[in-house]
């Protein structure tokens, strides 16, 4: 039944992803922290390489497709300017792979924020709440991060449709909270 799917993300019991690169990792949570397992290709099995992954409380990486800057909400534009301000002691750097999972994974390990805002062309955002944002938000929170649409906690949003799209921001708590303060004040 449709209503079985249209539940807020806080009702999830597990979430995870597999990431491929120089190594293959499986990262998952069942609601009791986040663990990462790396594939050992010599024996064909995964081993616990990253136990109890935690987001750094702050970071210096912001991940966003700045090519859409002119279409972003004012709060997002202000946050990007804040990150680029040379007088800012935090020395933020932009790193954007263009893959939600890859950008999120790097930011979770090193500290940072992933941003996929709504734009004037995509007023509801582009990422899907149920099967993109909720699983990543669940992992994010289990690792001590924060996930929001700019105003509300992602896992508290009650979906209206299966493919509902929303703006999505997640990452290190101090970075996401700074963004939220700029979103709320605009």
Image (cartoon, rainbow, N blue to C red):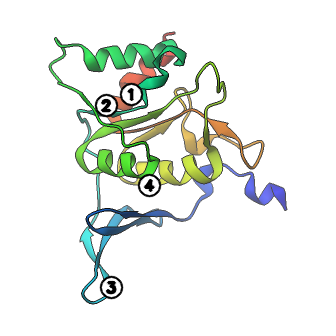
Q: How many marks?
A: 4
Residue at 41%, 54% (x, y): give it.
Answer: 142
Whether residues under marks 1 and 4 lie with C-beta atoms below 8 angstroms apart, the answer is no
Tell me the number on the disc at residue 45: 3
**Label whose residue precedes the other's in the sequence (3 or 1):** 3
* Image location (x, y in percent) of residue 105: 35, 52
Tell me the number on the disc at residue 177: 1
How far apart are the two marked residues, 4 and 3, measured between alpha carbons?
Answer: 23 Å
Instruction: Please determine whether, in this image, residue 116 is positioned above or below residue 9.
Output: above
- Residue hosting label 2: 174
Residue at 29%, 52% (x, y): give it.
Answer: 54
**SS of the residue at dot 3?**
strand
- Residue hosting label 4: 139
* Image location (x, y in percent) of residue 52: 29, 62
Residue 97 is drawn in which quadrant? Answer: top left
Whether residues under marks 2 and 1 lie with C-beta atoms below 8 angstroms apart, the answer is yes
How far apart are the two marked residues, 1 and 4, measured between alpha carbons?
Answer: 18 Å
* Image location (x, y in percent) of residue 128: 63, 44
């Amino acid at each position: 039944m449709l209503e079985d799917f249209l539940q807020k993300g806080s009702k999830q019991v597990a979430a995870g992803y597999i990431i491929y690169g120089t190594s293959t990792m499986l990262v998952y949570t069942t609601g009791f922290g986040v663990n990462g397992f790396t594939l050992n290709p010599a024996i064909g099995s995964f081993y616990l390489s990253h136990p109890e992954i935690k987001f750094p409380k702050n970071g210096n990486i912001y991940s966003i497709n700045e090519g859409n800057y002119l279409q972003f909400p004012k709060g997002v534009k202000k946050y990007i300017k804040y990150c680029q301000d040379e007088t800012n002691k935090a020395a933020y750097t932009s790193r954007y792979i263009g893959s939600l999972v890859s950008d999120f994974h790097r930011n979770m390990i090193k500290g940072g924020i992933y941003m996929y805002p709504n734009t004037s062309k995509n007023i509801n955002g582009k990422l899907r709440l149920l099967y993109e944002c909720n699983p990543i938000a669940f992992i994010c929170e289990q690792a001590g991060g924060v996930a929001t649409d700019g105003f509300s906690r992602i896992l508290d949003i009650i979906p209206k449709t299966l493919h509902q799209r929303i703006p999505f921001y997640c990452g290190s708590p101090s970075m996401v909270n700074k963004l939220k303060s700029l979103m709320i004040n605009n």
